[in-house]
Image (spheres, rainbow, N blue to C red):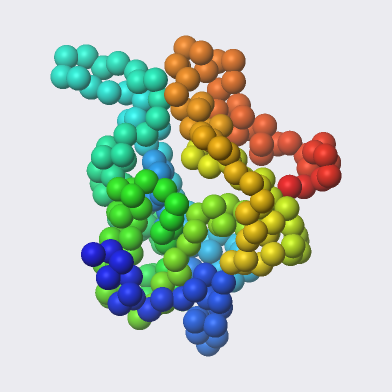
Amino acid sequence: MLRARLRTWRLCRFGSHVHCLSSRRPRVVLGIESSCDDTGAAVVDEHGRVLGEALHSQKEEHLRVTDGLSSRFRTGGIIPHVAQALHRQHIARIVQEALEKSGLRASALSAVATTVKPGLALSLSVGLEFTGTLLQSLPTPFIPVHHMEAHALTVRMVHPLPFPFLVLLVSGGHALLALARGVSDFLLLGQALDEAPGDTLDKVRPSERAAAPPAALELTAVTLSPDRLPGGCL
């Protein structure tokens, strides 16, 4: 059903989306993310400036499970049907909050970009369903986003990095090495044979995470200088 609805939307290929957008006014895109356990939305202009953003994290909900008598902590990981329900509960609020922070109405958007893959099917369906409903009332193109490609391209929002460049992507469900040759032109060089590091960390018992808590790893990734990496920025 979702595939059928996608075919009816004003579709833009991710690599050529500029040609789908009107040049009569500054281009502004609403991005919607629901591939896993975070519901996110952001309004970004054509210069890469984030005008407004909002995020709802499901971390605590997935860690704690209520069995009717007491609450206990799981060993980790995402519960797909819980993630789907929480996305549905929060996605409208998150999108509205991002729009309000940007100071723009939905009618001012030049396009809507939504994650279509890879990710949890139940989670992805919420973002796509919401996008479909939104586009029914807007004469706005739709940009399908491969979220691992998007991860690779975010560096260009903060650094003037020309193509081609080598990128190592390590996330909750993926670990891969690729050559980025263009906005939608990637050469996959290698990937994890079984589980990604983030997926493995999810399954470590909370009492054992103190040795390498995910938050500490994220902080290191943000603060680590590219000069300290072999070969510079990946």
Is residue 84 something one can see in this rendering? yes
Q: Residue at x 50, y 28 (%)?
A: 200
Q: Residue at x 55, y 15 (%)?
A: 210
Quadrant in the rendering for residue 211: top right
Q: Position of residue 96 (x, y in %)?
A: 35, 58
Instruction: Tell me if residue 196 comes above or below residue 87 in the rendering.
Output: above
**Residue 148 shown left or right of residue 10 in the figure:** right
Residue at x 31% of width, y 39% of height = 80
Q: Quadrant of residue 49?
A: bottom right
Q: Report the number of discs.
A: 0
Q: Nearer the viewer, residue 173 or 49?
A: 173
Residue 70 sits above or below residue 190 on the image = above
- Residue sticking out furthest to the front: 193
In depth, the one of 83 and 108 nearer the eye is 83
Look at the image and tell me in which quarter the N terminus lies. Answer: bottom left
Residue 6, placed above or below residue 59: below
Please provide percent x and percent y for residue 133.
Answer: 26, 67
